Amino acid sequence: MSVVATSSRFKDNAHRALGDGQLQKALGNVRHNFIDRRAQAAARLPEFDALRDQARDLRDHVLAHLDIYLDIYTQKVTAAGGHVHFARTSEEACRIITDLAKARGAKTVTKGKSMVSEEIGLNAALERNGIEAVETDLGEYIIQIRGEAPSHIIAPAVHLNQEDIEHDFRRLHTWLPKDRDLTAPESLLAEARATLRAKFLASDIGITGANFLVAETGTSVIVTNEGNGDLTQILPKVHVVVASIEKIAPTLEDVSGFMRVLARSATGQDMSVYTTFSTGPRRPGDVDGPEEYHVVLVDNGRSNMLGTDFQEMLRCIRCGACMNHCPVYHAVGGHAYGWVYPGPMGAVLTPSLIGVAEAGHLPNASTFCGRCESACPVRIPLPKLMRHWREREFERHLSPATVRSGLALWAFFAKRPKLYGLAARIGVKILALAGRSKGRFAWLPLAGGWTKYRDMPAPQGQTFQAMWKSRGGAVR
Amino acid sequence: MSEARDDILANIRRSLGVSADDASRRQIVATRIATAAKGLLPARGEGDIEKRIATFRAQAESVAATVARVAATADIPAEIAHFLRTNNLPATVRMGEDERLAALPWATTAIDITKGPSDGNDLSSVSHAEAGVAETGTLALVSGAHNPTNLNFLPDNHIVIIQAGTVVPTYEAVWEMVRARYGKGMMPRTVNFITGPSRSADIEQKMLLGAHGPRRLHIVIVG
């Protein structure tokens, strides 16, 4: 895989992110906009929660019959004149696509936004073969010219401020007048639009992802707001869809149900601007559209997740609501997670795809507040899945010595309730005495990691158990 | 390649603990696809035709589309001329060979018409939608010999004509129309669901119109 994972250095990444003023400013946008807009969209649709249940059940049905659906989907694509390619690994997927491009003498490839293409490292593979890959989603274009990975699965440049983008456009678009005014975001958008319009019209192959693959009709579905995915797939002679194997929806009716929860959960829109259903290449008599249509289905570890504790993760429809609602994501942003998928869904998916040794730290990046699960349109029990990973990390002795000895110490007391009660009473008394003047600590021995970023409240002198008892609560 | 396919399908079955010759699983899938049962349908798009049109209009306007309604087909060119004038646009439009568009009395206006797919230099285009979906103010357009898909995306201003009688409550109602025309399990090359003009919020989450597709979407309801 050509995306170098730094997930094993999550702690260092997070420290750096917390100290990055620019990043912290940009993350402020996530905290408010996404959450408020989703809540408003949900409130406008009385059936929203019932639709989430339906979406969950349908995803489970698809996963339980995935082999059969893939078979039927493949037959339908072929019948419509398209080609389906299966790829077991990232390397296989990249080779299929670069071979297709080379055989057609392609020099430029335009791309719609696709997370699985990030996962398989497609851009680097194309570049190694002398093919220019141009990202056309505005956010993806911005991070591509900065040489960065996306920091969010639907808002890839959410870690940047307007000044960052202006700086990069001035650095890269050197054919434009130096004294042009780029102070308004509209002027940045207009500049990207004009630059990319030329790329769209000159492109040899268009590569998009797929939000859904419809088994009933052999159709790939993309959902965008910009229209870049459509220009990517209708202008060049060849349209290549790259999608992971679990994207199947049985029927057009089923896709309709998913559409109702996807945009509302993602951006808080009732519906994204463009939802496009593509089936095969252009038909006899069609005046535009691609002459060839290929679908590359990527497994890359997913078939191994079925039947395990992590099967529920494959319900994911990539809306980003879990990261939008995550206090850890709000604090450190997406890059700290060190690979392609950030936030709670990334913390569960990444160890499944690249291994617990490499990404075992990520499931620890959680306060277990449960907001991710409560916002998930397909109700993935993300905290439970993160806990499964933590258990595995501990079992395989991958957790650091400090964590292991801390847990061992806690376990010693937890197994001896009387001793636990005594130690807690003493500890609480000492802390209450020491902190009585201010009611909080700006520094505590052994707790520098906590007090560096926030104060620790001082306890008021009694343990919960003691207060429970004094109020007549039942004691076991 | 088929080796990769066989490997992946075999691995899925192994992980799920199922066998390839389990006919009951195949039957469940075949039934689901054959019946294409509708799921839960939001009530918001329901109602008689006037209620549906009112919902469609309100939803489309809430996502920055503009909507006009004319009484008869013959009034369409004048409405389009009015839209172009109001927005200071030249009186030129590009459109496909769709007979419903060709039959309009364009000569009553000064609009200059060119036909065929766009080369990226057209300011305004006109398309005919097959349906409108009330629940979200969404237009449904299909590709074909007479409807270049790129006219929905390349020009800065997209004008879409829709017959009042084709405003349906839900997306599912569009699929009924598509199946009636193309057959069960069949689709035209492209079906475009369009809800408002193109936009992006990739710069500091500020919503800006006209990212790569049209900056303006003008819907003309007829009847």
Image: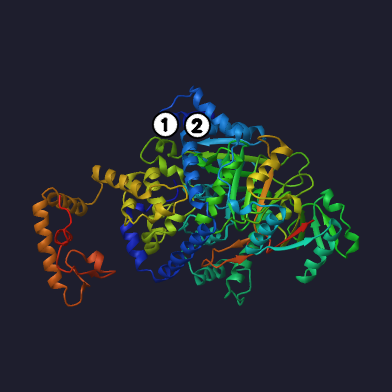
Q: Are marks 2 and 1 in contact (CB under 8 Å)?
A: yes
Could you tell me which quadrant the N terminus of chain A lies in? top left
> Looking at the rendering, which quadrant does residue B79 occupy?
bottom right
In the picture as drawn, the residue positioned furthest to the right comes out as B107
Q: Seen in the image, is A216 located left or right of residue A68?
A: right
Kind of residue at disc 2:
Asp
How many discs appear?
A: 2
- The reply to whether residue A210 is visible in this rendering is no
Give the SS element for disc 1.
helix
Marks 2/1 same chain: no
Picture coordinates of residue B166 (x, y %)?
Answer: 73, 50
What numbered label is drawn on residue A67? 2
- In this rendering, would B216 be left or right of A71? right
The image quadrant of residue B199 is bottom right
Q: Which residue is mark 1?
A: B16
| Image: A448 above or below B153 | below
Give the structural element (helix, strand or loop) at label 2.
helix
Circle 2 crowding by C-alpha within 10 Å: few under 14, some 14–19, many from 20: many
Q: Residue at x 91, y 61 (%)?
A: B107
Q: Is residue B84 left or right of residue A128?
A: right
User: What percent of the width, then of the height, locates residue A192?
Assistant: 61, 64
For disc 2, the chain is: A
Which one is in front, B41 or B25?
B41
Location of residue A178 in the rendering, given as x and y in whole percent from the top left corner:
60, 75
Camera-nearest residue between A328 and A8: A328
How is the rendered protein coloured? rainbow
* Residue type pointed to by label 1: Leu
Residue A294, image x and y in percent? 61, 39
In the drawing, what numbered circle is on residue B97?
A: none
Alpha carbon distance from label 2 to label 1: 10 Å
Residue B8 in view here: yes
Q: Is residue B220 above or below residue A3?
A: below
